[in-house]
């Protein structure tokens, strides 16, 4: 249809004045370009290669509905929004842009691009004034290191901070993390979580926290709260656990526990450090050791524990210092310090050690115990050795000397051998019910054989010096060898161990987000939406618009 020159000038002038007036305020949407313009009275439909502008924001799309009265536009098809003053760009299939609030509502195939960090979703509200993007119904963030997904999220661009909520998953080449609340800083690439957090490494190691965590994804540094790190060779747990993966270093505070899976040894304490490569750990503060055997468990309490166990080291040991308490079904003891050799399962006690076995008590300056096939087989003692054994009438049979070798069968003593300055005192019984008297003997060597903890045979060297004291002549002094002490009140028990440190066992059924099936979230298709509306009696009608005849070119449009 042709227009006369006056008509063309009048329409073109009106459009020019309208655009100029709305562009003067600086906060209104402007139309820069479109292939065609339809509509009037505050509503315009822009078709083909639409270009709009709002302050420093440029908008491109295939078509748009522009509502001048409310300063809002609905954008359709290949929507692209960018700002000339920052690096953020967005793409979507559909969007609504409010020029008054600078709020962009982006829908379907949304890509929020901030240079190195990209956000993908189908539902995104972007407040350009505050520079905050919020998504819901699932989103994915990708940068050079990590991929993060969640049900909901908020990207605070100025702070380079993204908050993820509900079904959060972080994936990188080394780890997969699951949680329900995570704050990610895009510049240092750190992730901080709250509540239950579970990780699995590419090697299959697990890192779990019940009360949140911090993860530096570039420097491979972790901090867990009520956390456990479980690898093929060890398990480390603490209320606050620091793990530097590149150094293989752990540091724990409060209720620390380190479990060596190969040795079946678990160490507890208030604070601890562990070097994975060296197999070296240091734990102190009401420290405790549990050494697991097939039929039994050894408990060791101390102030400080040091463990060294690595294949390249010839010496593999556990050292314990101060206030030693040792409890096993066939062995109980106390001392100031202890050394346990992993290679040959020997235990050495130093500085005033005392050991109780069944009905016997042995003291010496130092002791070495040999454990074979998980049972106590032999004990070797040096200097000031003193052995006390009770009989069926609770009499104290005694031996002393410079050195002692003790031999055990099924955890019970069956032979004692004293070497050097030997002395013995044992009660002669009649039928295990009546005391006849006391045998006291001096001999360079003494050997006693036992059965069921009772002396059955005594053997001395060539020239022993002995005497028998009838029961009616026995006095307190004659019934004790010099240095005798019965220290049963010092004997530790399991109650003593648990008073020293109460161990809370790890719950094998603790909730783990990797045990839950992954839910697939899928957006309904247009056909499914249409059917759902029809079921509810809703059938939207398409608006019927009468096209306006194009009478001139838009500003900046070539004829």
Image: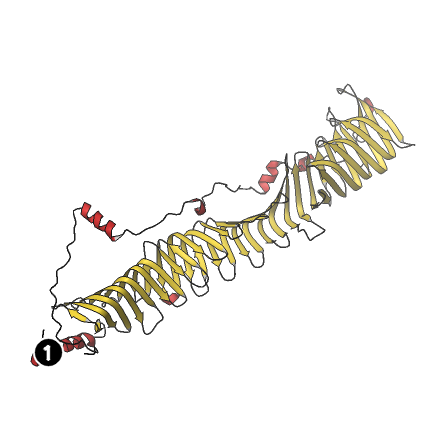
Q: Position of residue 78 (x, y in %)?
A: 28, 65
Residue nearest the viewer, comparing 285 with 306: 306
Residue nearest the viewer, comparing 448 with 66: 66
Q: Which residue is at a point 76% across and 20% down the rendered structure image?
A: 432
Answer with the quarter of the image where residue 458 lies: top right
In this view, 432 is above or below 19: above
Residue nearest the viewer, comparing 336 with 414: 414
**Mark 1 lies on residue:** 8
Answer with the quarter of the image where residue 104 lies: bottom left
Does residue 361 appear left or right of residue 492 in this picture? right
Does residue 63 appear left or right of residue 389 in this picture? left
The residue most toward the front is 1
In this view, 21 is above or below 270: below
Q: Position of residue 8 (x, y in %)?
A: 10, 78
Does residue 174 appear left or right of residue 464 in this picture? left
Q: Position of residue 271 (x, y in %)?
A: 57, 51
Residue nearest the viewer, comparing 145 with 486: 145
Quarter of the picture containing the N terminus is bottom left
Q: Position of residue 484 (x, y in %)?
A: 77, 35
Does residue 82 appear left or right of residue 240 in this picture? left
CA neighbours of label 1 inside 10 A, class few (<14), some (14 to 19), many (20+) = some
Q: Secondary structure at mark 1?
A: helix
Residue 481, can we see it?
Answer: no
């Amino acid at each position: 249809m042709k227009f006369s020159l006056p008509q063309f000038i009048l329409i073109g002038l009106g459009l020019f004045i309208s655009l100029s007036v709305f562009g003067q305020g600086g906060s209104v949407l402007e139309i820069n370009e479109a292939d065609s313009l339809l509509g009037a009275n505050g509503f315009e439909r822009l078709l083909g290669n639409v270009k709009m502008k709002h302050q420093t924001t440029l908008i491109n799309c295939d078509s748009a509905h522009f509502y001048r009265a409310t300063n809002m536009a609905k954008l359709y098809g290949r929507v692209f929004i960018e700002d000339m003053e920052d690096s953020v760009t967005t793409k979507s299939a559909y969007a609504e842009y409010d020029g008054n609030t600078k709020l962009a509502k982006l829908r379907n195939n949304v890509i929020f691009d901030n240079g190195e960090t990209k956000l993908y979703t189908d539902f995104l509200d972007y407040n350009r004034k505050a520079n905050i993007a919020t998504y819901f119904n699932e989103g994915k963030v990708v940068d050079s290191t990590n991929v993060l997904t969640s049900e909901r999220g908020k990207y605070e661009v100025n702070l380079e901070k993204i908050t993820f909520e509900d079904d959060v998953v972080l994936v990188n080449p080394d780890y997969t993390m699951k949680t329900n609340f995570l704050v990610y800083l895009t510049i240092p690439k750190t992730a901080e979580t709250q509540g239950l957090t579970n990780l699995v490494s590419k090697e299959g190691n697990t890192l779990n926290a019940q009360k949140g965590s911090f993860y530096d994804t570039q420097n491979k540094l972790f901090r867990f709260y009520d956390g456990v790190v479980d690898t093929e060779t060890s398990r480390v747990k603490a209320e606050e656990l620091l793990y530097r993966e590149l150094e293989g270093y752990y540091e724990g505070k409060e209720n620390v526990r380190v479990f060596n899976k190969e040795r079946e040894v678990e160490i507890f304490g208030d604070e601890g450090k562990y070097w994975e490569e060296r197999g070296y750990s240091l734990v102190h503060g009401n420290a405790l050791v549990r050494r697991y055997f097939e039929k039994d468990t050894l408990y060791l309490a101390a102030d400080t524990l040091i463990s060294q166990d690595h294949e390249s080291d010839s010496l593999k040991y556990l050292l314990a210092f101060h206030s030693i308490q040792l409890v096993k079904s066939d062995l109980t003891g106390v001392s100031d310090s202890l050394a346990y050799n992993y290679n040959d399962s020997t235990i050495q006690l130093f500085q005033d050690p005392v050991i109780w076995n069944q009905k016997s008590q042995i003291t010496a300056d130092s002791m070495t115990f040999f454990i074979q096939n998980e049972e106590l087989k032999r004990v070797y003692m040096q200097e000031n050795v003193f052995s006390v054994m009770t009989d069926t009438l609770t009499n104290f049979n005694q031996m002393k000397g410079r050195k002692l070798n003790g031999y055990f069968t099924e955890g019970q003593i069956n032979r004692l051998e004293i070497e050097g300055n030997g002395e013995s005192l044992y009660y002669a019984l009649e039928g295990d019910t009546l005391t006849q008297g006391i045998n006291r003997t001096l001999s360079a060597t003494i050997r006693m054989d036992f059965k069921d903890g009772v002396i059955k045979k005594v053997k001395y060297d060539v020239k022993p010096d002995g005497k028998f004291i009838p029961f009616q002549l026995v006095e307190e002094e004659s019934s004790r060898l010099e240095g005798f002490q019965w220290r049963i009140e010092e004997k530790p028990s399991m109650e003593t161990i648990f008073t020293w440190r109460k161990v809370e066992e790890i719950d094998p059924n603790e909730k783990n987000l990797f045990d839950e099936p992954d839910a697939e979230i899928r957006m309904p298709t247009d056909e499914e939406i249409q059917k759902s509306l029809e079921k509810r009696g809703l059938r939207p009608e398409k608006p019927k618009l009468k096209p306006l005849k194009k009478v001139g070119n838009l500003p900046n449009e070539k004829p």
